[in-house]
Image (cartoon, grey):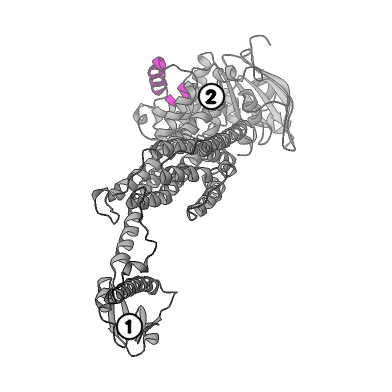
Amino acid sequence: MTGAAVSVERLEKTLGKNRVLRGVSFQAQPGEIFGLLGPNGAGKTTTLRIICTLLSPDSGTVEVLGFDTRKAPEDVRRQVGVVTADIGVYPRLSARENIAYFAQLSGVQDGDLKRRVDAVIERLDIGSFADQRAESLSSGQKQKIAIARAIVHDPQVLMFDEPTSNLDVLASREVREFMVESKGRGKCVIFSTHVMHDAERLCDRITILHQGQVVASGATAEVRGDKRELEDAFLELVGAR
Amino acid sequence: MRAALIVYRKEVIEILRDRRTLMAIGLAALATPIVLSVISQVATKTATQTYTIGYSGDIPTGLGELLRATGLKLVPVADPAAAAKQQVDLGVAFKLGEIDEYYDPTRQGAQIADTRLQTVLGQYDAAQAAAALQNRGIDPGILTPLRIVAHPLSSPVQAASNAFLSFFLPYILITMILTGGFSAALDSTAGERERKTLESLLLTPAPRSRVLLGKIGAVTTISLVAAVAAIGSMFVALSQISLPGPSESAHISLSPVAVPVMVWVALLIGVSFSSVTLALGTLAKTFRQGQAYVTPLYFITIFPASIILFIPDFNPSLAYYLIPILNAVLVLRDAIVHNTVDWPALGVTTFSLIATGALSWFAALRLFTREALLTRS
């Protein structure tokens, strides 16, 4: 599809003896939240890692804003911000230092660094703990740092891989609100989750993966079909009911 | 290079905020003076300590004064052989024209007392022989037909100082460079994986070679800081210790030639072994696993080098200078003891350590760019 922010075509990947992806294809557009759903081991994280160039596909292609992940991995990484469930931060750096470090490595120039870092600190309401060492912060506060470092270079594509799985209710809601806000700013948001309730509320379109294959793809309402909830459709598709 | 500098600066800040690394450097700075102080006190005590000789029979005229002046105390005993086993350091039975000596060579005190006794008896015999000859009108000079006149080319005090430094300095320098950077290297590789920050770091557009370069630079810096702290404290401690000698120059000091050689060798070891430890740390999933990989490296490298320190006259061929760490010890020893630079040996050492660093660098980079780095965790 022309104008897609992320275009994945016939992706294949084997890790060890495990054939993780079997011809996965989908496209995600700017200004939408695209859900990548599936049970554990379906291949969601592997797909996201290939999109952000951490892994190479065995075959198939991935383009991010027109950049091929194999030919221009550094250009792709400039366009992508990733938030995962593993909210690892540098414990001996402050929240501000953590964010500034990733901003610099993502190419933000020194003259623009303070403005960018201050902007994300304000946007994510980090100010009250910005100068505390990360080792003393709560999981929710660390997740905010993780989001801040992923967006500080203003990427056009944001990927969230099970971002709320280690968070409490309040912190989870803030992450969901941030995804909606990013969509409103015209970003392409890819949301990987196995929480159907979240996906149904947030995603404009979804793709469901099962055992490395796409088993359903389309607008969220289309995939839900005549079922009462998306979860019912999901369970039927993955053969659990 | 901007990315490498960014990583370098962040790593150094993190390391300097890490209690483990700071404690390692602090302990190194404290341990060296303490060890040297203990060695100095033991040596002084040994040199001035009085040892006891249990004797029977009549002491030859004049010998008693000589023995007492040499720190040997004479105590009359009934059975010198039995006394030498427990009561005294040495047993002596004075007989007419003969002295029976009893001592246990397994006891250090007995060995020192024996050496002193032999020295005193040699002097006493020579004096007695000279006096007897003089009484007969014969020149005592016939006892030494070939008289040795020694002309030492350097100060005996300086020679002792060099021997001391050639033993301790390479060992402390290399130990501190190797161990000072261990914690930092593991923290920036296995620790990064354990804290789950590695994936985020690799997601940045910064080339991985630059990221690795920044980490190697930081680990090298910390290694050298640890070495400088240990050596600096060593020289402060040595400035308080005097070797037996007539003047102020008896203090231990490093020759001008040895200083640049030491700096060059320290840089080479720092860079090359930072690459080695980073490569090993990259293999590990956790800090603790990294320690298990890195600790044997220390023993593998320092053990042969330590053995060489106990062979002062070991004159190796150039091939020995290809062995990392051992070569550094040999080059440093040459510079300290002989106050000269053996350029071919230094050249081979430089080549060897650069090659070690380059191989480790490529190994670390290969490990750092493979997919298993993420999928194994």
Closer to us: B8 or B106: B106
Task: Using the image, determine if residue B335 lies above or below residue A56.
Answer: below
Alpha carbon of mark 2 to alpha carbon of mark 1: how far?
Answer: 81 Å
Q: Earlier in the sequence, mark 2 or mark 1?
A: 1
The one of B296 and B127 positioned closer to us in this rendering:
B127
Dot 1: chain letter = B
**Any part of residue B334 in sight:** yes
Report which residue position mark 2 lands on: B204
Neighbour class for label 1 at 10 Å: few (<14), some, many (≥20)?
Answer: many
Q: Amino acid at mark 2?
A: Thr
Q: Is residue B307 magenta?
A: no
Q: Chain of mark 2?
A: B
The residue that mark 1 highlights is B54
**Coordinates of residue B332 in the picture (x, y in percent):** 45, 43
Three-letter residue code for mark 1: Gly
Tell me the crowding category of disc 2: few under 14, some 14 to 19, or many 20 or more residues within 10 angstroms, Cα based: many
x and y percent of residue B346 in the render?
A: 51, 37
Q: Quadrant of the C terminus of chain B?
A: top right
Quadrant assignment, res B370? top right
Write the residue at 37% across / 70% down.
B115
Magenta stretch in the rendered image? A100-125
Q: Is residue A160 above or below residue A7?
A: below
| Residue A228 picture location, percent across and down | 65, 28
Is residue A107 inside the magenta stretch?
A: yes
At x 33%, y 90%, the residue is: B78
**Regarding mark 2 in the picture, which secondary structure is present there?**
loop
> As rendered, which of B19 and B94 lies closer to the eye?
B94
Cβ atoms at labels 2 and 1 below 8 Å apart? no
What residue occupies the far front of the structure in this picture? B137
Q: What element does badge 1 sit on?
A: strand
